[in-house]
Image (cartoon, rainbow, N blue to C red):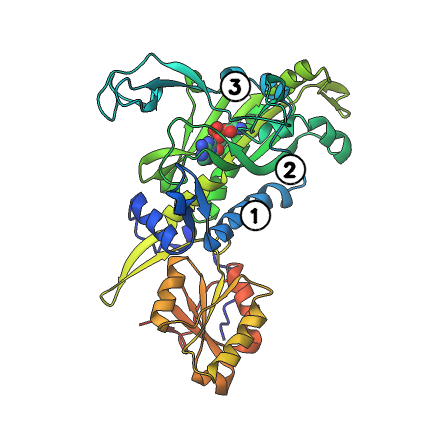
Amino acid sequence: MNKAGKLSSDASEKGDLRMPAKVDMDKIVSLCKRRGLVFPSSEIYGGLASCWDYGPMGVELKRNVRDAWWKAIVHERDDVVGLDTSIMMHPGVWAASGHIDSFTDPLVECKSCHLRWRADAIEGKGCPKCGGELTEPRMFNLMFKTSMGPVEEEASTIYLRPETAQGIFVNFDNVITTSRKKLPLGIAQIGKSFRNEITTGNFIFRTREFEHMELEYFVKPGTDEKWLDYWVKERFDWYVKLGIRKENLRLRQHGKDELAHYARDCYDIDYLFPMGWSELEGIANRGDFDLIQHAKHSGKELGYYDAEADEKYVPYVIEPSAGVDRSVLAFLIDAYDEEEIEGEKRTLLHLHRDLAPIKVAVLPLSRNEKLTPLAKEVFNKLCPNFVTDYDDSQSIGRRYRRQDEIGTPFCVTIDFESLEDKQVTIRERDSLAQIRVPIEELDKILEAKLKGEAFDASPLWATREK
Ligand code: GAP
């Protein structure tokens, strides 16, 4: 068995096995469909523009992205707590936050083909589709409206939240008084947000329904710039730790004319998507804008008494705000790779082990009736501890390729020798190295490997898949 005890580093530090290949979006969309990651929504009805459904593999990947964020932001810190607030909120929230007045994009319409465009996203004067004359821009509010209760009147109009942040601000006092925590204190939330975007596209990059991962980190005024720098670095490093190549990430500070109505300063973490550098996450210094606005509109004081300094103030807020779906897309693109093994093309995802939808695949060499009971026994032993797949259809080579395409880090093969020596072969996705280990120790070994222990195969029994 493998004697290596050294903890290996993450993909980015390991020396990158991946080609710096730039993949186009069509390949990602097609892989996602083929392997059950993401499907077009309502497909049997012809689909619904910019809406997508996560399939059996996608739901695991998305959950792993959320869990990795929650672990880093909430569980591994003692200065952040979590929250899960309602999607539908009192309409007064959106008046106070400025979303009713300012959450708008300039919209123009083509007088010939009637397509609508975001005025600030088109070049030239004519319609990008047909060259037709465009109307004057009008401001279009991006919030989805609906009505609450059985009476459809103005008083019952509510909005689907366009960000999860406001649920945090309106609960600031509840959390501070019940958690007995001191500042600096962060409140984190993951949940769905809705924006009636004028232009969507690029797969799951910009959609009208998406999932936010937001942290509102409340600090003493005057320390805000320091905390902004801190969170920009933390968030950048999070993507790198989970396998995104540094050279595909960059930081960009917003110009004064670009800042959102609530922001004093803001940095974007951009990723080099197939369509070019685009925002992956924003980290803003929201100052005291939100707490002051909610105090004004609700009539409830929203301040903080700092017992150590014996003073009262309205905290400033640093907000790292990321999209789950957009992160999933960046992780997929960065992990995508194609290589040739002995004249055959292999497509694979070098997903970080924490993100991979399936951690271990159990593959009996064939459906032979002698092998199946042992293979099932191995599967049953592993599945309580790891997300495990069992696959005995088609040739072993094709099954390896299927697992490579969804980024499964380890495949466990049961062969006829296993019946005699009670050992199985573990095959590692990236290096294709194989080690033979006793079934008795399999879960212990896999656990160590999935925590990052090097797949340092001893030359005595190491082989490489042919
Ligand atoms: N609370 C601040 C806020 O929402 P934002 O820059 O509008 O800031 C933050 O959004 C992140 O949410 C973006 O960087 C992106 O990852 C994600 N996001 C925003 N709009 C999105 C959309 N229409 N589709 C998918 N993700 C979106």
Q: Where is residue 98 in the image (x, y as percent from the top left)?
A: 55, 17
Label 1: element kind: helix
Which residue is labeled 1 in the image? 67
Task: Work out how far the residue at label 3 is from the one at label 2, CA to CA, in angstroms.
Answer: 27 Å
Mark 2: is the Cβ under 8 angstroms from ligand 1?
no
- Give the mark toward the camera: 1 or 3: 1
Task: Answer above or below: position of 347 versus 125.
Answer: below
Type of amino acid under label 3: Arg
Q: Where is residue 399 in the image (x, y as percent from the top left)?
A: 38, 68
Residue 84's disc is: 2
Type of amino acid under label 1: Asp
Q: Where is residue 390 in the image (x, y as percent from the top left)?
A: 48, 69
Task: Work out how far the residue at label 2 is from the one at label 1, CA to CA, in angstroms.
Answer: 15 Å
Q: Earlier in the sequence, mark 1 or mark 3?
A: 1
**Which residue sits furthest bottom?**
420
- Given residues 228 and 158, the one toward you in this image is 158
Label 2: element kind: loop
